Amino acid sequence: MTSESGKILNRKDLKFIRKLITKSWILIIGAPVLFYLLGYIYSYRMVDIYAAKTQILLNTNDTYDYQNTIYSGLGYYGLYADLTNQQRVLTSRDLIGEVVDRLNLKVSYFIEGRVKTTEHFENVPFSVDIEIINNLVYKVPIYFSFISAKEYRINYEIDGQSREMIGVFGKLQKEENGDFTINISKNREVNHSTLGELSSIRYFFIAYSRGQLVSKYKSLMDVKNSENTTMLEVTLNDVLVKRAIIFLDTLNKAYEESTLEAEYRINEKTVQYIDRQLDTISFDLNKLEEEIDQYKKDKEILNLSKQEELYFDEYTKFESDIRIQNLNVKNLNDLESYITGLKEDEKVLPAAYYMLKDDDFLKKLIDELYNKQIILNGILSSVTAKNKNVERLEKEMRLLKASILELINNDRKAIKDRIKNLVVERDFYKEKIKQLPSSQRDLLSIERERVVNEKMYNFLLEKKVNTEITKLSIAPKFKVIEQPQSAGIVAPNKNQIKLIFVLVGILFALGISFLRVQFFNRIDSPNDLKEITSRLIIGAINLVEGAEKSDIVINSGAKSNVSEAFRGIRTNIDFMGNHDLNKDSAKTLLFTSLHPGEGKTFCSTNVSTFLEKAHKKVVILDFDMHKPKVHQRFGLQNNDGLSQYLSGKIEIEKLFKKIEGFDNLHIVNAGPVPPNPSELVHSSLVEDLIIRLKKEYDYVIIDTPPIGLISDSKVLAKYSDINIFVVRAKACTNRGIEFLESIAQDKNIRECAYLMNMVRQKKWRYYYSKYSYKYGYGYGYGYGYGYVEEYGKGDEG
């Protein structure tokens, strides 16, 4: 069997939980409901955030194979292969700025409702064209209202100053403070019949700068790459789903145009470079052909021999090779200048790059450098130059530049060595030609120049044709595979918000309930009292409306439940303390309470009457000389009482009052309120009086002031056999009981018991503050009134 200590929840814990629920069940049920309503209102006022998505596929194979071959030969292929590069391009400020400009998003329109404010992208009965002059106007709500079908009013606030302007629809106007120029156009739906309805709507608009809009949409965009694919998913969050869809659609178009623009620009620059070379060579060819015809005519030369043609062909071949190699050297020099002077915003490779034929490795390194430069430009648009990624890229680019420059030098040296060899071969045939007759030699020389230029012309013409073919086949290197569409509401999660509010409500209710039970617990039943004290509870008196106002309960048959409660208390008192008492001596009962208004006098007077009806001889002493009430219960005058006896004013025989209908019950009044009641309690006459009464009566009942406020009860407790603490249900607390227990222990008060008064079965009202206020007034402000009036005058006489 599991021990009590080993259980997760023992009986005490379960009782505490039950008490927690039963005492605060309204709060525990009501708080979550209230917080749910608050969460519903809060979430209703929140603006829904929608997401729109589109998917694009990079490096599509929509071009023909021979076109890809051309791209590869010219360095195009792989230009957009870097996914990270394209992610940055799609979120670059330049591209987003282009979309913002096309859609004209610099003004946002709103309708202000009673509960929430909503933004509108379309279906607004007016459109605003505004140019901001004062930058403070940006992001400031400008309220708009219709005056008539021709005029409008706008008002706004800057630096705490309200400004207003009345304008005419369709007319460009300048604000009188020079904040902006504005032209507002109305839609066709604005007319005299709709003006009344439109005038009741509260519109306002907000103007944004281009930079603010770019930053806004850049922060709202997200580009992700699907794993192991070249697919990019672009997501945009916006309060207006239609605007988000249009934005992404425009972004796709702008991205396509930007990629095509770069390729067209590269192609055109290459063609221009080749055309310049062709123009020069074409001019030289025409000139040489004219020289050949004129020379033949002047020298009357018809044809050359086969041997002469052989010399000439070989010489021409080597001369052509030398010129091509010199062109390669020039291209390398141009590349070297490009690499050493590369600028941050450089986006086009030099035309010389596309004229390289033999060194694929060099072209690969230049491609890599170019792509890294584009990535660097994209990063620098959003971070500073001190960013770690920027520093890493710059270091990689420096290493690449060094490798490229070294490779250019090596290639240039190799080409120059080859030129030297070609010159030797050419000069050999040049010497052979020199042996020919001068007329034929001169003709061969001219012919040689023509053939060399012709080969160069054909070479460049071939390159131009290839470039033109490439231009015709240029197509986007990506494809939109999923058009922009709504992905639904992504924020806020209103169900989660309402759930959080409910949980907070539950925690709030439990927290308040715990504090109430733990620190402010009101004891409302004998069972609750048993849980915190081991002392005897001699009874509990049920709450009946008007019971305490009916003075003596035993006289009213209508209060039978209260009467039965007092009979039970009488029985318990009979059995208490018998083992300590001398049978020839009376039982002395002291009634007190912690606070005023708990019913100690009601209980003491009624216990005395029920003891008397049991044929017991009873006397009740009203030692509450601060605020006496016993005489009121029995309808007596408060004269000839304890305050006078203890002051030596009267003899003991005058103290006892008979009560009609109670032959064996005597009352000793408190007497007029003295100025020093607590000092009178310490008189030796008190002990003498109680000793005498215990010999003459079966029960001596002492009604005393609240022990929590006045020390009289602590002094009188030494004369008592049974000390009864009267506690009022729903008024006493755990701390109050602990205080009573500490008093009983510290003052060594013997035979203590509790009597619970006003135990309620249904809803209860809170009386504590009312009764404590009344009692406090009597104790504080009522000192000595009766005493002065009664005996002050007598002393004067």
Image (cartoon, rainbow, N blue to C red):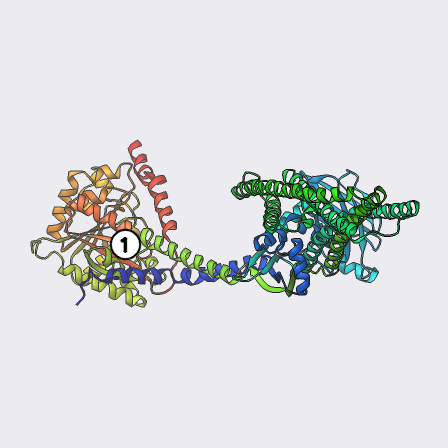
Tally of numbered discs:
1
- Identify the residue at image location x=72%, y=58%: 470
- Identify the residue at image location x=20%, y=37%: 648
> Does residue 792 lie above or below 492 as drawn?
above
Q: Amino acid at mark 1?
A: Val
Q: Is residue 578 left or right of residue 168?
A: left
- Identify the residue at image location x=25%, y=46%: 707
Q: Secondary structure at mark 1?
A: strand
Q: Which quarter of the picture shows residue 579?
A: bottom left
Task: In this rendered view, identify the residue nearer to me: 271 or 794.
Answer: 271
In the picture as drawn, the residue positioned furthest to the top comes out as 796
Image quarter of the C terminus: top left
Q: Give the residue pinned by disc 1.
A: 727
Q: Which quarter of the picture shows residue 508?
A: bottom left
Q: Is residue 525 left or right of residue 700?
A: right
Task: In this rendered view, identify the residue nearer to me: 791 or 616.
Answer: 616
Q: Which quarter of the picture shows residue 635?
A: bottom left
Task: In this rendered view, identify the residue nearer to me: 653 or 530.
Answer: 530
